[in-house]
């Protein structure tokens, strides 16, 4: 799915080049991909002003850390976009704007999710990426095991 998003964003931009709103939404979507997991969880893109992306962060420590990595973030972001649409990123401290993901308990124990997922193996073998395939099978097995209890 992430690969699909990476190809869709540049196509969308080429088709809606005149729309500031479409450009902003494309930059926001690209931010989710470029930022990566840990950073994505503590940041939220707020707006695109000309070629400056404004991103909310939870505190000054995060702002300082992300400012030190700004060049890398710009490179990744513009690579995902397929064009240099963003020339700078401004990090603003505003924890209220950051979208929080619900906490998932980490202490769930499963006996044998691989056995539960065995019936899905044929469909899972169609997933080309082995990491995604294994993750899918583990998650599906856990869900099936939970439903069986």
Image (spheres, rainbow, N blue to C red):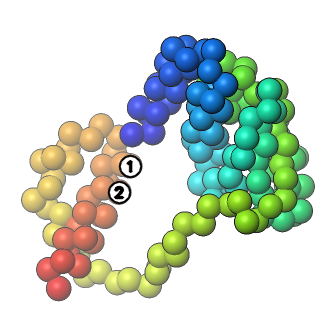
- Residue at coordinates 50% horizontally, 30% vertically from top-left? 6
- Residue at coordinates 10% horizontally, 59% vertically from top-left? 119
Q: Which residue is mark 1?
A: 131
- Front position in the image: 96 or 66: 96
What secondary structure is marked by label 1?
Answer: helix
* Left or right for 17, reference 132: right
- Front position in the image: 121 or 53: 53
Q: Quadrant of residue 113?
A: bottom left
Q: Quadrant of residue 56?
A: bottom right
Q: Crowdedness of circle 1 by 10 Å Cα count: few (<14), some, many (20+)?
A: few
What secondary structure is marked by label 2?
Answer: helix
Looking at the rendering, in which quadrant would you find the N terminus?
top left
Q: Position of residue 35 (x, y in %)?
A: 65, 45
Q: Position of residue 132 (x, y in %)?
A: 36, 48
Q: Which numbered disc covers residue 73? A: none
Looking at the rendering, in which quadrant would you find the C terminus?
bottom left
Q: Is residue 105 above or below residue 139?
A: below
Q: Which residue is mark 2?
A: 135
- Front position in the image: 117 or 15: 15
């Amino acid at each position: 799915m992430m690969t699909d998003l990476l190809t869709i964003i540049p196509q969308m931009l080429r088709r809606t080049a005149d729309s500031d709103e479409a450009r902003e939404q494309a930059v926001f979507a690209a931010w989710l991909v470029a930022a990566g997991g840990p950073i994505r969880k503590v940041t939220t893109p707020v707006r695109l002003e000309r070629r400056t992306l404004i991103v909310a962060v939870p505190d000054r420590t995060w702002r300082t850390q992300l400012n030190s990595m700004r060049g890398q973030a710009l490179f990744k972001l513009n690579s995902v976009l397929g064009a240099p649409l963003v020339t700078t990123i401004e990090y603003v401290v505003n924890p209220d704007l950051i979208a929080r993901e619900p906490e998932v308990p980490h202490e769930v124990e499963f006996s044998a999710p691989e056995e539960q997922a065995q019936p899905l193996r044929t469909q899972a073998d169609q997933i080309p990426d082995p990491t995604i395939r294994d993750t899918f099978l583990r998650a599906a097995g856990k869900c099936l095991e939970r439903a069986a209890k």
